[in-house]
Image (cartoon, rainbow, N blue to C red):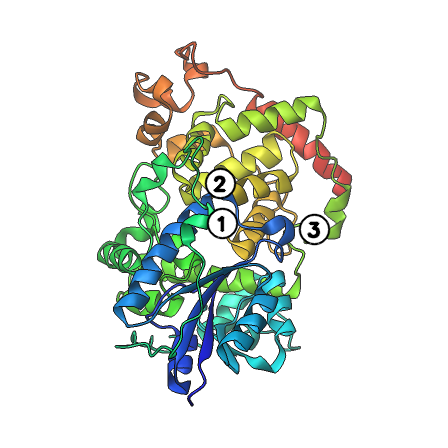
Amino acid sequence: MTEPSLLWLRQDLRLHDQPALAAAIHDGPVIPVFILDDAAPGAWRMGGAQRWYLHHALEALAGAFEDKGAKLILRRGDAAETLRALMAETGATRIHAIRHYEPWWRKAEDALGDALIRHDGNHLTRIEDIVTGSGAPFKIYSSFWKALSTHMPPDAPLPAPDHVPGPKHWPTSERLTSWRLLPTRPDWAKGFAEWTAGEAAADAALRDLAGRIDAYDEARNMPAEEGTSRLSPHLHFGEVSPRTVWHAIDSRSQGAATFRKELAWRDFTDGVVMAMPDYADANGRPKFDRLPWRDDAAAKADLKAWQRGRTGYPIVDAGMRQLWATGWMHNRVRMITASFLVKHLLIDWREGERWFWDCLIDADYGNNSVNWQWVAGTGVDSNMFGRIMAPLVQSEKFDAGDYVREWLPELKAVRGDAIHDPDAAGCRPPAYPAKIIGHREGRERALEAGRAVR
């Protein structure tokens, strides 16, 4: 065909294993387009940390397209309207895109009608194919994993194209710097420099993980070690595909098996929000609407202390400061900090969910909402509300001492096991706050609140 096709890019910022790109090239000339649409997501527009990462990801992607003889066109506005305008401007008759499951993207996709050709490529397999016997999406992960396993391994990833053919005349593109995605006054993202965006960085992180995957099952829980995959930002922005990751892990170890289940969790969470689009705002189990969350002045002060890493619980505070400084937090510590907010402080999980949404570079609509509801006990597949993590025990169990010293400089001089609870050890420095609530007191208050649900 001589008419160009539009390639609509969102969280699939790659050339390797890009089915929509491959199909567009097969049709003829390709115009890659990224549209910054802040209106469609509403309250779930990208947070500050995601916007920082997006800037660098788009820079890297634009360079990758230039190397293939093409350009990345940037536009800002309503995605569906902008795409229709680009079709009229360029003479394009088709839009190729990888399917997305966030409710605002599904609405935009439907608005484009037959002009849009959707492809599967951001998951291990097509989400709609992993359903119960009655044809409904799974709400329990263990059942989902069992069904998904019958479809594994996923198809082999597609190679990146040697060349991306472009149109005779390119449409104009906005300048990335005009979007002001990077913070300036103040520049709170200086610590984000530990992250490098782009496919090359994703590939390097994947090769690094493949070399240590056998130790993953235990190492992933140790905050002071480099035991997690470090792939979450690359997977969130689609700089690497899940099936590329799956095939790169060439091991039959327990570490590899554990990691593959966690990779599949991403597919599961998108299935949940496909079935329940408002999952980020509503309890998965409506009976938890009766739970008496704290919402007074004292609760607001406690929320601010949690956000700033000033709760008096070292493992919690270290995690919250790592989050603010780097846009990322160790997975084990994410669970500990979330449980502390919901159970010890009895603050609505949605407060923590939105804080993570703004602060995490890898904040994902499905993952973020399902994970918070899992910890809170309010979700369709979740912990019991009465299960309350003991942060001081968790810190010692997973040997988090060096992690705490790294992120809490005021505790750097605390030696030995006292680092986990310097208050109880009698060596808390004056610069570090006392606990805002005792573990037993917080636990009993949460259990009492839980009785209102039963």
Front one among 290 and 73:
73
Query: For the residue marked with disc 1, what is the amino acid?
Result: Ala
- The picture places residue 172, in percent across and down from the top left corner, at 44, 65
The residue type indicated by label 2 comes to: Cys
What secondary structure is marked by label 3?
A: loop
Circles 2 and 1, Cβ within 8 Å, touching? The answer is: yes
Q: Residue furthest left?
A: 211
Measured in 3D between alpha carbons, the distance from the residue under mark 2 to the one under mark 3, in whole angstroms, is 21 Å
The residue where tag 3 is placed is 282
The 10 Å Cα crowd at callout 1, few under 14, some 14 to 19, many 20 or more, is many
Q: CA distance from mark 1 to mark 3?
A: 18 Å
User: Could you tell me which quadrant the N terminus lies in?
Assistant: bottom left
Question: What residue is shown with label 1?
Answer: 363
Please state the horizontal and vertical placement of residue 138, each as a whole percent of the image.
60, 67
- The answer to whether residue 93 is left or right of residue 385 is left
Does 277 appear above or below 323? below
C-alpha separation, residue under disc 2 versus residue under disc 1: 8 Å
Q: Is residue 24 above or below residue 396?
A: below
Which residue in the protein does label 2 denote? 359
- The nearer-to-camera label among 2 and 3 is 2
Q: Secondary structure at mark 2?
A: helix
